[in-house]
Image (tube, grey):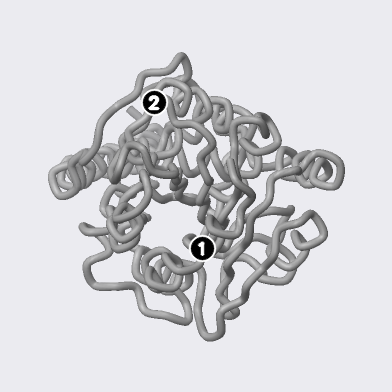
Amino acid sequence: MSALSSLALIALAAPAALMGASHLKTRKLAREARQLVPPIGQFCNTLQGKIHYIDIGPRDAQPLVLIHGLSGQLQHFTYALADALAQDYRVIAVDRPGCGYSTRTSDAMAHLPEQAKTLLDVLDKLQVHQPVLVGHSLGGAVSLAMALQAPEKIRGLALLAPLTHPSKQGAEAFKGLIVHSNLMRHLMAQTVAVPTAQRTAEPVLQQIFAPEPCPDDFLIKAGGALGLRPESFVAASADASFLYPAIEDQAARYAKELSKPGAILFGAEDAILGPQSQGKTMETYGLSCQIAPDLGHMLPITAPALCNDFIRATVQALPSA
């Protein structure tokens, strides 16, 4: 073998070894994450995949459906908010399709209308009638998609720092999720994505929570450790990559088709989504917007008492079901 051939083999072997090591580390981190944060709810089977959810509170009370945001899971609500609401409401918190312990049949199910269809199917199967949708961040966009798709099934909206309009500049924390090739997305998930997420977790969480600190128990109590699994990267990447043009099409429909009443709560210092462009703009379509001073994006975790009061006030102000 010539020296040139030997060098070529070495050049090929080095990245292969790196990918192999990354895959082994990914498997280890994913195994540890599942042990730290096991599923806490039940599962509902749909044609689009199985949905992990909790269903707590009085069964005959007004139902609230809690829908988390990008890279999240239902523990964002069970962290501090769900139990407080469940004292007086039937609370259903879901892992969105593909997120947490929910699954979806393909990456294309990340399209907003498809997520809405799946969750509406779940509500039908669980016999949840006239719920108020409580969507946080991307969960707000999914809630709005549900209200547009089946307004007769939804009583109202109580949205927390929701994505409502295109925001193409995006947050720096999520730009690495944009991968338009399904094959590359799954390859990255099994190799470099999870170790990279572990290495960059601290600055990313600082940005998402700013100006407030990320709580020390976020990884376990709020389920953050579940992000260190290949399936979590796939879900978050697909959610981000399939967001356009769906959110543009959705926003264009509000003027003529959004008929559900409700309200929006934003933190004035939100570093992820703009309170004015994403919140105040919705007052044109009948959703009042409250902006709380000094707070950031992760309201269900950092300001659960405020969220609890806001949701209760929103429900009380809705017309009778």
Residue 82 badge: none
| Residue 59: percent from left, percent from top | 32, 37
Measuring 31% from the left and 61% from the top, which residue is drawn there? 84
* Left/right of residue 188 with respect to residue 272 in the rendered view: left
- Relative depth, front residue between 169 and 176: 169
- Is residue 52 something one can see in this rendering? yes
- Relative depth, front residue between 159 and 25: 159
- Is residue 292 depicted above or below 223 in this figure? below
| Residue 80: percent from left, percent from top | 30, 63
- Is residue 10 something one can see in this rendering? no
The amino acid on which the numbered mark 1 sits, given as a three-letter code, is Ala
| Residue 102: percent from left, percent from top | 36, 32
* Left/right of residue 257 with respect to residue 262 in the rendered view: right
| Residue 113: percent from left, percent from top | 64, 31
Mark 2 — residue? 126
Q: Quadrant of residue 11?
A: top left
Callout count: 2
Q: CA distance from mark 2 to mark 1?
A: 35 Å
- Is residue 91 depicted above or below 234 in this figure? below
Measuring 54% from the left and 58% from the top, which residue is drawn there? 316
SS for tag 2?
loop
Measuring 58% from the left and 40% from the top, which residue is drawn there? 321
The amino acid on which the numbered mark 2 sits, given as a three-letter code, is Leu
Task: Looking at the image, tell me whether mark 2 or mark 1 is earlier in sequence order.
Answer: 2
SS for tag 1?
helix
Residue 173 badge: 1
- Is residue 135 depicted above or below 297 in this figure? above
Residue farthest top in this picture? 47
Classify 10 Å Cα crowding around label 1: few (below 14), some (14-19), many (20 and above). Answer: some
Q: Nearer the viewer, mark 2 or mark 1?
A: 2
